[in-house]
Image (cartoon, rainbow, N blue to C red):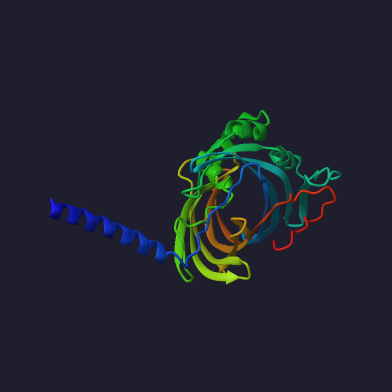
Amino acid sequence: MPRLRFAVAALLMTGLLTAATGQDKDKDKTRFELKLTKDQTFYQDMTTTVMQTIKVQGQDLVQKQEQSFFFKWTPVKQDGDKWQVKQTIEGVKMKIDISGNPIEYDSTSPNAAGSAGNPGLTDFFKGLVGSEFNITFNAKDQRVEKVEGRDEFLKKLGSGNAQMESLLKKILTDEALKQMSDPTFGLMPDQPKGVGETWEKKSTLSLGPVGSYEVTYKFTYKGKEKDLDKVEVVPTLTYKAPTEQTDGLLFRIKSGNLTSESPAPGSILYNPKSGRIEESNIVIRLKGELMVTIGGTDTKVELSQEQMTRVRTSDKSYVTKDGKEPAKEPGK
């Protein structure tokens, strides 16, 4: 019996020492996590700018596109590690210039009627505004587990067009909505990180009849930048052509070979006080060829694209009556 008690005591001591060593090991590391407080609303602005050149039969089709989505997030209730969060699309801005033909829409401007160049596209963006989702966010794993509101969202965007609604169902899958409804954008590591340590996040972005992208983000914690934690990020994309034909499009992508590169590492600034991403800036270039079938004829398409995405977070809405930026609070 004494030996048994000694063995139990030794095992217990080993466990305590291991736990203490683990805590000491993480003492100088940073924990990246989204901090939520009931009814404490926060806001995000996600702006993406795309410069794209498509070469078809020796002719260049140049397109510049800028889209801004303004999100409102309200933590509703907590149940253990799980939070119920309401996401609202407060506003949308869109500018598209296709070979000198501009299309614009701005839901944040009360006097903006949108562009007559493509009323269908304008109506689509109008349908986005005011859409709401109920999200289940796992604070322990820092990920979105469930999104409710998809069916209502698809009906709203489809506007009674059964063909459009069917196409959107293939693009806006449950997994796609989880990625779109993640206030951390999948950037948070699941373990504390020290300066110089790295981690990766992988995901699949499915665009239905347009194909899919395997996306890998490699992160490196660079340390403090004033009161914020800076993370360097290098994204890579691998394109896969669609495996099945879908009605609703005037073309079909048969095959594709696209490669990506990051001209310079992107950056993420995490605010440990608020527990949110203060700002992130990521640039990625995509280049290659697609084989597209239009009207039964196969055509080679050369694609060159640069995409810049910026995300900002604030305690004040980015949708203001005067159209100005929300004032930053001291220390933000």
- Counting from the top left corner in percent of width and height, residue 203 is at 47, 52
Name the residue furthest front. 2
Could one spot residue 281 in this view of the protein? yes
Asked which quadrant contains residue 88, the reply is: top right
Taking 89 as reference, is 143 left or right?
A: left
Q: Nearer the viewer, residue 121 or 290?
A: 121
The residue at 47%/64% (across/down) is 193
Q: Nearer the viewer, residue 134 or 168?
A: 134
Asked which quadrant contains residue 279, the reply is: bottom right
Could one spot residue 261 in this view of the protein? no
Taking 260 as reference, is 305 left or right?
A: right
Taking 243 as reference, is 18 left or right?
A: left
Taking 35 as reference, is 313 left or right?
A: right
The residue at 65%/33% (across/down) is 158
- Counting from the top left corner in percent of width and height, residue 278 is at 64, 59
The mark total stands at 0
Considering the image in quadrants, where does the C terminus appear?
bottom right
Q: Nearer the viewer, residue 43 or 119?
A: 43
- Counting from the top left corner in percent of width and height, residue 81 is at 49, 43
- Counting from the top left corner in percent of width and height, residue 239 is at 49, 55
